[in-house]
Image (cartoon, helix red, strand yellow):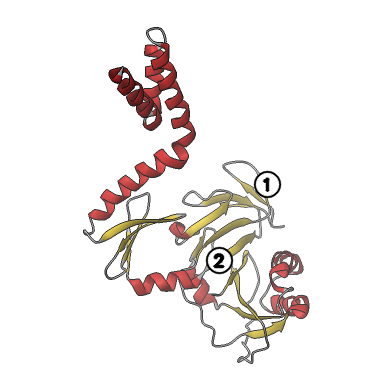
Amino acid sequence: MKKNTLKLFLLFLLGLLLPPIGLILFFVFIKKNKSFSYVSGLGFLLGIILIPFVTLPLIIRMVMYNKCKIYGSNYKAVIERPFWYCVNDIDGDVYMLYPDGDDVHYTKEEVEERRNSGVAYKPIIYLYPKDKMEVTVKLGYPNNLTHTYPKYKDAWNVIAYPDGTLKDIESNRELYSLYWEGNNRVNFSTNDGFVVSGEDTIKFLEEKLSILGLNEKESEEFIIYWLPKLENNKYNYIRFATIDEINENMPLYISGKPDSIIRVLMLYKPLDKYKKVKEQELITPKRYGFSVVEWGGTKLK
């Protein structure tokens, strides 16, 4: 009796932890002993259900544990989706783990800077060539990307038309822009900017986006996305990142030698009361020939 109970328990455990083995056992024992087959089958079903919640996380943590020990006995594995880290318990240093094996080391101070810099939300890229042409668009730090559409695989390859219409070469889908979001790499300056009441958001953005080189269609899409995040706040601190800051945060490489590239990244922070700041001086870029336009934003912490 005890022996059979032990067998049943082991079969259930095998089925639970290793579903493929549980399935094999189910078919092996189905004719010989129904109780054995039912128990292994039950373990198999539970194992399948628990794979994404228990089995895979356990395997991942075991792999990460061994990986982190390479860097020293004080490193422990931490998952903060979508990233995996090896964190040193003593000095706070971090190794960020990437699937390609090209791990990156950060000091505790650098980690804090990355966490405080936030996320670049909804940058979208428009392409306006002078004639229909095939264009390749690359982002400088693909490991920092969190969401992309179309799905970013080393680069985007599209056919671009003068009216801004795009056709994704891989899927043959028609697009009007390329979209990405990602973790910021830099701490943006807050030495100047604007403080704008929520109710004045539309007027402010229409004026400033025009100065920054966006046309009415692009400005409309920008405002439609950001208005709900700004208008309900009593005040907002707003600053537009410089082109040097934007390029450092996420370099952009485009084939076909664009004549003009306009990149707008709005930084904002909700405020409960008005705060006086040095007004930012905005520069209007030249827009001509094969032009590329990108806009996005980030909430400051």
Question: Of the numbered discs in the image, which one, if any, rests on residue 126?
Answer: none
How far apart are the two marked residues, 1 and 2, measured between alpha carbons?
25 Å
Where residue 255 sits in the image (x, y, percent)?
Answer: 52, 58
In which quadrant of the rendered view does residue 30 lie?
top left
Amino acid type of the residue tagged 1 in the rendering:
Glu
The foreground one among 253 and 118 is 118
Secondary structure, mark 1, is strand
> In the image, 19: left or right of 231?
left
Residue 110 drawn at (x, y percent)? 37, 72
Give the residue at x 60% y 57%. 179
Residue at point 68% right, 46% down?
A: 174
Picture quadrant where residue 14 is located: top left
Is the Cβ of the residue at disc 1 closer than 8 Å to that at disc 2? no
- Count of labels in the image: 2
Q: Residue 127, how many percent across, how many down?
A: 63, 59
Q: Secondary structure at mark 2?
A: strand
Q: Which residue is mark 1?
A: 174
**Which quadrant of the view contains residue 294?**
bottom right
Q: Quickly name the residue at label 2.
A: 120
Q: Is residue 274 left or right of residue 142?
A: right
Q: Is residue 173 above or below residue 141?
A: above
Query: What's the residue type where badge 2 is placed?
Result: Ala
Binning the other alpha carbons within 10 Å of mark 2 as few (below 14), some (14 to 19) or many (20 upward) gives many
Nearest-to-viewer mark from 1 and 2: 2
